[in-house]
Every structure is written in C-alpha cells, then in structure tokens.
Amino acid sequence: MIIRLDKFLAEMGYGTRSQVKKELAKGNVTLNGQVIRKPETKVDTEKDRVCWKDEPAVYAEYEYFMLNKPAGVVSATEDKREKTVIDLLSRDGSEQGMPAARRGDLFPVGRLDKDTEGLLLITNDGELAHRLLSPRKHVDKVYYARIRGRVTDEDREAFARGMDIGDDRPALPAELEILDAGETSEVRVTLREGRFHQVKRMFRAVGKEVVYLKRLSMGSLALDEGLAPGEYRRLTEEEVKKLC
Ligand code: URA
C-alpha cells in the first residue's frame, strides 16, 4: 500500500496530522535511514522502513484484539472522567506479555456496561463492526450471569417468548439456560440482538436483578478464558477469517 508519510504516522497513533507534521519538521522521522521533513512523502508500507524518534514504526491496515473487559472501565474510545477500554491497550508493549497496539483509530465493537466483564472485540475495521452489530444480522451474544433469587422455568419460558422491556418493540426471543438455581442463581443467556442494558432489563421484566454479568462470546468469537480481566491478545488469523 502506498500512503503519505503524515497519514501513515497519524493512523499509527503518533498524533494528529498537525502534531505529526511538527515532529517531521523537527527531523524526528526517517524513511529508509534518511531524515524526511515533507509530510506528503509517499511510503510503500510493504517495503519502506519508517522510524519515529529512532524507533521503527510498522504499518497495520487493520488490527483486531480480544479484551477480557474488567469491571470499572467504560466501553468508549475517550472519556473525560472514566478509564476506557482503549486506555487498557498498551501502545508500546510494555505491559507484560501483551501486544503493542499500533493503530490510533481502534474502537470497541459495541458496548458492555461499566460493571460488565468479558469479551470485547477492539478493532479499526468499521465494516466488520457494522456487520456484527447490525440488528438485521442477529449475531448471537452469549452471557454468563448471576441473578439474585431463584431463576425458574417460567422465567426461561418468558425469555423464549420474547418480552416487553419498555422499548417500542418487544425483545426478541432469547435462550435462558439455568445452570444453578438458588438464593443466587447462575444462568447462561443467548441474545440475538444487543440493546442497551438488555440482559439486566430482561431480568428486571421478570422481577429479578443481575448481580454479575460477563460476555462469553459474540458470533463465532469466544472469550479466551486464559485472559484475566484487563488482559487482551490479538485475534488469530483463523478467528478473524471466521468473523469476516
Ligand atoms: N446486557 C446488559 O444488561 N449489559 C451489558 O453490558 C450487556 C448486555
């Protein structure tokens, strides 16, 4: 791919186009060993070697990460007050065993509530995100939840019928699997859509409260249980192929 040097660097998260231009003017960027000051210089991303302040800058058109989202961070790219899921990605690989994210335009595919844990796909591939989130595509999302109180067969049937959760359309039928019923129950829920607070609102509609929620999978992509909350890894080529 042939791309302007300033665009290359801005896309790789070294700053805005104007910040990058300033660094170019200071002589902080080399192309194949030569200091380059002209932002419009063309770079062949396959062959050319770009260095930013003596460190190699490698181009990636798309990046795909699987994050085990911890509770307490928001599913956004920026937030004035809260820590975001994008803040958890290491820019320089300094976090132990975690890959360095190169792109500066990464975003989470869909949202998990601040207190929800589990699978979050982070990418800059807008088309893939659109396909996964499109309400018409009905991509399955599977959650593990702990519920205050005993979850019953009637609840399972109500989920299977679909229910009014206060929107203009009822929630689509969802699968509720009861793993353990007691003072606190454990369940697995499969949704075919992704509305705001949907799992919590479906339980509220049957008079119950979600006390813990974790997403286990989205379409063909399953959370790698080897990732502790807050950890992430790149998707394998196989995982990306299956999703696309
Ligand atoms: N449903 C919820 O209620 N919260 C989430 O974070 C995801 C699904």
Image (cartoon, rainbow, N blue to C red):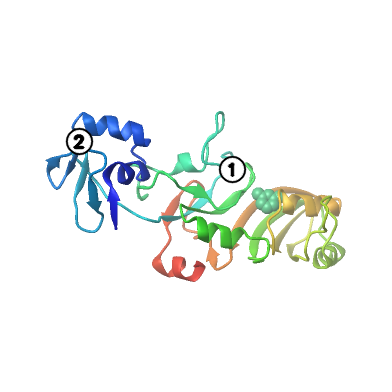
Q: Residues within 10 Å of mark 2 (few under 14, many from 20)?
A: many
User: Which sits in the foreground, 83 or 115?
Assistant: 83
Picture residue at 39% right of the left edge, 43% below the top: 90
Which amino acid type corresponds to the residue marked 2 in the rendered image?
A: Arg
Question: Is residue 29 placed above or below 160 in the rendered structure?
Answer: above
Q: Is residue 93 visible?
A: no
SS under mark 1: loop
Whole-percent x, y for residue 207 in the image: 86, 51
Left or right, residue 193 beside residue 237? right
Q: Residues within 10 Å of mark 1 (few under 14, many from 20)?
A: some
Which amino acid type corresponds to the residue marked 1 in the rendered image?
A: Ala
Picture residue at 64% right of the left edge, 66% below the top: 137
Q: Disc 1 and disc 2: Cα gap in Å?
A: 44 Å
Picture residue at 23% right of the left edge, 50% below the top: 43
Residue at far left of view = 33
Whole-percent x, y for residue 141 in the image: 64, 62
Whole-percent x, y for residue 178 in the image: 75, 64
Left or right, residue 37 beside residue 148? left
Q: Is residue 171 visible?
A: yes
Residue at image mark 2: 37
Ligand 1 near label 1 (Cβ, under 8 Å)? Answer: no
Name the image quarter holding the N terminus: bottom left
Whole-percent x, y for residue 113 in the image: 64, 45
Question: Is residue 51 placed above or below 59 in the rendered structure?
Answer: above
Residue at image mark 1: 71
Left or right, residue 182 beside residue 88? right
Q: Earlier in the sequence, mark 1 or mark 2?
A: 2
